Structure formats: structure tokens, C-alpha cells
Amino acid sequence: MMLVLVLVRAAVLLVGLAVSCSSDFAPPTIDVNLGDEPQVRWMPILKVFESDFLKKAAQEVIDSTIPKWLHKVLRPLIKVSEVLLLPEPYGEELRGMAAHFGTSLSDTIMLNFAYEASAFCTSIVAQDKHGNVYHGRNLDYPHSVLRNLTVNVIFRKAGKTLEKAEDFQDAVLRLSKIPIITGVYYIVGGARAGEGVVITRDRGGPADIWPLDPLSGGWYRVETNFDHWLPSPAKDHRREAAEKAMNATGQEHINMYALYQVLSIFPVCNGITVYTTIMSGATPEKYTTLVRPPDCRASSG
Ligand SMILES: *[C@@H]1O[C@H](CO)[C@@H](O)[C@H](O)[C@H]1NC(C)=O
Ligand SMILES: *[C@@H]1O[C@H](CO)[C@@H](O)[C@H](O)[C@H]1NC(C)=O
């Protein structure tokens, strides 16, 4: 399953947190206007990255994810099937990117699958003693080229951020019900006390809804890449490490900075962690994303 997270009342400003890792850096921010035609709405990317760099990066991810022989076999197949299979507006968006970034359409499509096949994440939603809700996540991805390709994207429609949801309840309802193309975990953090939930999705609807429950000790929820009611695989200790660190921090000491520290502990932060995001729906101006150095373990002390 893929992991996605959603912040209700999306973030607009970037404010740097004081952090111990000196080589962490804040990625650039672009505006994507959903009122623009799908073909051109991703053009703002070219304001922050050279197209040569994008082409090289795309090649690197494909080379390291897809064996050469398979790439050769897939290319013509994808060319034929994309016309039939890509739902709009994603088809138009990918066609636009391929045309403007100078990559072939079949490679652009393959890149999207490569991402889904190899992305790992750790996400935490937590509430402090005063009812403030914090939300943090790491993106783990085994291609270091992504470090320099990370951008903050602000989606706007008619000048407003976040397309449809009225409030937390509405967002949870929409995310639970809309049909999607793959199973997914949604981690949603709201602006008010109690507004935090992990939604485990099947394609057709919700498989499980796991809200914060601070009155019964559930003041945080950790979601990695596995259904939370099942044990995580023997080789993956991110969930246990994150829970241990949250327990050690305690509800009385949780805040944005403490959450960043939890997401910096090995193996929650590890050799393939690309970035850490910390946010809180009530204070969108404090949204922070920092790109992690290639060896998070060495610098997280
Ligand atoms: C990525 O960005 C960092 C920090 O700006 C820079 O030091 C590094 O050389 C860049 N790496 C590549 C492959 O562009
Ligand atoms: C964290 O604390 C909760 C509640 O006391 C406990 O059930 C859980 O086992 C602890 N987790 C870890 C990894 O220590």
C-alpha cells in the first residue's frame, strides 16, 4: 500500500525549525493552480529546476529501479496502453510534463509506477495536553537524486488552498469514501483537539478508521507501511522505534520540535529518508519540510 498524508487547512508559508542537522535544507516551493489546464499546470517546476537536471534525474531513477531489458519491453507496451488506461486529468498532466520536461511519455508513466513501488514512509499524528494536534512524516525513497528534486507544492483553485474539504470531518468522510486506484493509508491531522486519524483504504472504501483517542491513552498514532493492527515485518523496526520515542517523549512534552526529534531517530530516519515534514492544521504558517542528508543516522544525534 502507498502512504499519503493530508493536512486539513493546507500550509502556505515555510518557517525553518531550529534543527541539529546542519546539512538539512528547505526545498523550494511552487504554486500549482488547479484552474490551469492539466497540460500546463506543472510548468512552475521549471522555475526551480533546469530541464536537463530533470531529465538526468528521471533517467537515474529508471535505471536503478527497472532492469534494462524490462525497460525495453515495457516502453512500447506503455505507449499503446496509456491512451486507454490513464484516467483524466492525470493523463493530460503526464502528457504535459513529458512534452515540457523533455522526457518521453512512457518514461514519465514508468516513473510514477517506480515511485509507488518503492516509496516508504513513517507518519505520526499526535495531540498534546492542551489539545494541539501535530502531524509529521518522513518520506523514504531509495534514490538520493530525489533529495534535490523535493519541492513544496501549494495547490490552489480560484486562489484558495485545498480543493474541496470543508473541515476535518468532511475531509475524513471524503477520503474514506472516494474510490481510488490503489490501497492507501491516509493520515489526517485537523486544526482542533481530537482531529487526527489514520484511514486504511481499500480501493472501494475504508478498511479501517483509527482515530486519536486521548482520553483512553491514544494521544498519538504511528503509521508506517503496514496495517496498524498487524505486526510489522521482522526486519522493519520503524513503527516500534517511533512508538518507543513517542512514549519516552510523553504527551506533556510533545510539540513540533519534539516530533521532529522522534522522526530523526534511527531507523525511523534512515539511509533512504529523503525529507521530514512537520505541520499542525491550526498553525499552517509553521509548516516545515527539511530534506535529510544522505545518512540520516549519522547526523541525527
Ligand atoms: C544536491 O543539493 C545539495 C545541497 O544544495 C548539493 O550540495 C549537492 O551537490 C546536490 N547534488 C546533486 C546531485 O545535484
Ligand atoms: C508505548 O506505550 C503504550 C501505552 O503505555 C504501550 O501500550 C506500548 O506498548 C508502548 N510502545 C512501545 C514500543 O514501547
Image: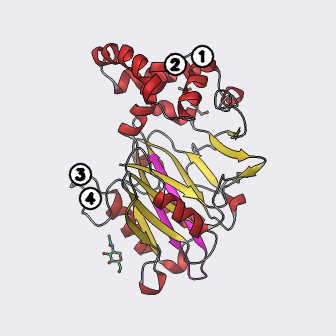
Counting residues from the start of the chain, the first of labels 3 and 2 encountered is: 2
- Relative placement, left or right, of 73 versus 140 is left
Write down the residue under mark 1. Answer: 52
Against 171, residue 150 (above or below) is: above
Q: CA distance from mark 3 to mark 2?
A: 33 Å
Q: Quadrant of residue 240?
A: bottom left
Magenta: main secondary structure equals strand
Kindly indicate whether the residue at mark 4 contacts the one at mark 1 (C-beta within 8 angstroms): no
Ligand 1, image quadrant it occupies: top right
The region drawn magenta spans: 124-139
Q: Which percent across, then down, holds residue 226?
A: 32, 56
- Total marks in image: 4
Kindly indicate whether the residue at mark 1 contacts the one at mark 2 (C-beta within 8 angstroms): yes
Write down the residue under mark 3. Answer: 235
Q: CA distance from mark 2 to mark 4?
A: 35 Å
Residue 56 is tagged as: 2
Determine the residue positioned at 64% across, 67% down: 167
Q: CA distance from mark 2 to mark 1?
A: 6 Å
Q: Is residue 233 magenta?
A: no
Q: Is residue 125 magenta?
A: yes
Q: Residues within 10 Å of mark 1 (few under 14, many from 20)?
A: few
Q: CA distance from mark 3 to mark 4?
A: 8 Å
Q: CA distance from mark 3 to mark 1?
A: 38 Å
Q: Amino acid at mark 3?
A: Lys
Q: Residues within 10 Å of mark 3 (few under 14, many from 20)?
A: few
Q: Which percent across, then down, holds residue 166?
A: 66, 64
Residue farthest toward the right in the current orientation of the protein: 159
Write down the residue under mark 4. Answer: 232
Q: Secondary structure at mark 3?
A: loop
Counting residues from the start of the chain, the first of labels 2 and 4 encountered is: 2
Q: Amino acid at mark 2?
A: Lys
Q: Which percent across, then down, holds residue 120?
A: 39, 46
